[in-house]
Image (spheres, rainbow, N blue to C red):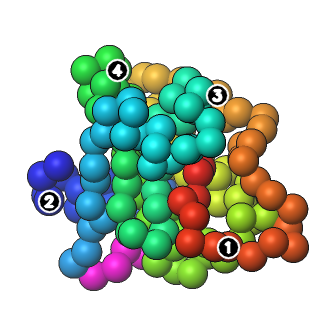
Amino acid sequence: MFIGFCFYLITVASHYSGLLPPPGTCPQVIPLGPVEFAAEMCPDRPDCLVFIFAGYNPEKKWVVIQKALEETYPEPVYHSYLLHEMVHYLQDYHGQITSRGCSVQNRLERQAYEVQVSYLQQYGYDLVIPEELSPSCIPDEVPLTNEVLVL
């Protein structure tokens, strides 16, 4: 991904979320094929390719996205998935990713979806925020580990 475009997405994510971006940094964005994506995002659930299109890894500070999305979806929709993950990057920068518990994950996920919806609306697309925001969340008393945050 071009660095300039990454900074554009960070700026948009910051605008809609109200979270200030870190100065001069952008996460690495890695497009992955289906096997690599499933191994990175959900090694125990290969069927996740149906409902997870991108993800942010707070330990590695990178975003992964299914490579096929760029060819499958119109540009604003594809960009909206990256934007959603940039919100998680900003949340991480501000220390908000503190738990894999449901209450934290649902709050973080709702904010990222709201940014994605606002972005898509300016291009005439509608996105319905799913009722179950964090199907992989775990009970709130379990702390965050070095695993990938699947949002």
Question: Can you say whether 102 is above or below 60 in the image?
Answer: above
Q: CA distance from mark 2 to mark 1?
A: 29 Å
Q: Are marks 4 and 1 in contact (CB under 8 Å)?
A: no
User: Is 35 positioned to the left or the right of 138 in the image?
Assistant: left
Going 46% across and 57% down the picture, which residue do you hit?
56
What's the magenta bit mostly, secondary-structure-wise?
loop
Measure how far apart labels 4 and 3 are at the Cα level: 16 Å
Q: Which mark is residue 128?
A: 3
Q: Position of residue 36 (x, y in %)?
A: 37, 40
Vertical arrangement, residue 107 with respect to residue 69, above or below: below
Q: Earlier in the sequence, mark 2 or mark 4?
A: 2
- The range drawn in magenta is 19-23
**Residue bearing the label numbered 1:** 144
Element type where label 2 sits in the image: helix
Q: Can residue 44 be spotted in the picture?
A: yes
- Which quarter of the picture shows residue 89? bottom left
Tell whether 69 sits left or right of 56. Answer: left
Q: In front: 148, or 83? A: 148
The residue tagged 4 is: 73
On the image, the x and y values in percent for residue 65 come to: 37, 41
Sequence-wise first label, 4 or 1: 4
